Amino acid sequence: MDFLLEHAHDGAPTKEEEDLIACAEQALPRFYEAMDDDLNTAGALGVMFDLVYDVNTIQSETPSRKAVEAARTALLAMADLL
């Protein structure tokens, strides 16, 4: 994530990057829901994996800073809880 953040551009996100931002915003509630379900760590890790997959499949070589920061913030919040 740090590499992507270093090489990100400050311009407006593309449609694909807007979708990534939406996924990042939805990831935390899904993660918390899994953890609240009798400490379902497998489900919580699945949420993290899905977000990492979405980040890795961005078609842009230099994604927008806004998209990268949204994904990074969500992943760090989930990792901190684990």
Image: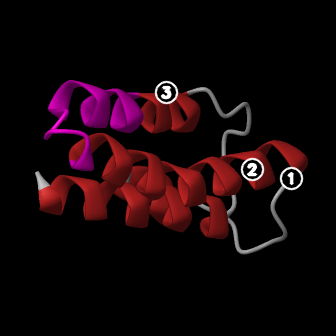
Question: Toward the viewer: 8 or 30?
Answer: 30
- The residue under label 1 is 14
Q: Which mark is residue 3?
A: none
Element on which disc 2 rests: helix
Pointer 1 or 3: first along the chain: 1
* Label 1 CA crowd tier, 10 Å (few <14, some 14–19, many 20+): few
Q: Mark 2 highlights which residue?
A: 17
Q: Residues within 10 Å of mark 3 (few under 14, many from 20)?
A: few
Identify residue type, mark 1. Thr
On screen, residue 36 versus residue 65, left or right, reads left
CB atoms of marks 1 and 3 within 8 Å: no
Q: Position of residue 63 (x, y in %)?
A: 67, 52
The residue shown at (49%, 27%) is 53
Circles 1 and 2, Cβ within 8 Å, touching? The answer is: yes
Badge 2 density bin: few <14, some 14–19, many ≥20, Cα 10 Å: many
Q: Which residues are magenta?
A: 36-49
Q: Is residue 14 left or right of residue 8?
A: right
Tag 3 residue: 53
What residue type is disc 2 on?
A: Glu
Q: Amino acid at mark 3?
A: Tyr
Q: Is residue 36 left or right of residue 73?
A: left
Residue 38: image location, x then y, percent:
15, 39
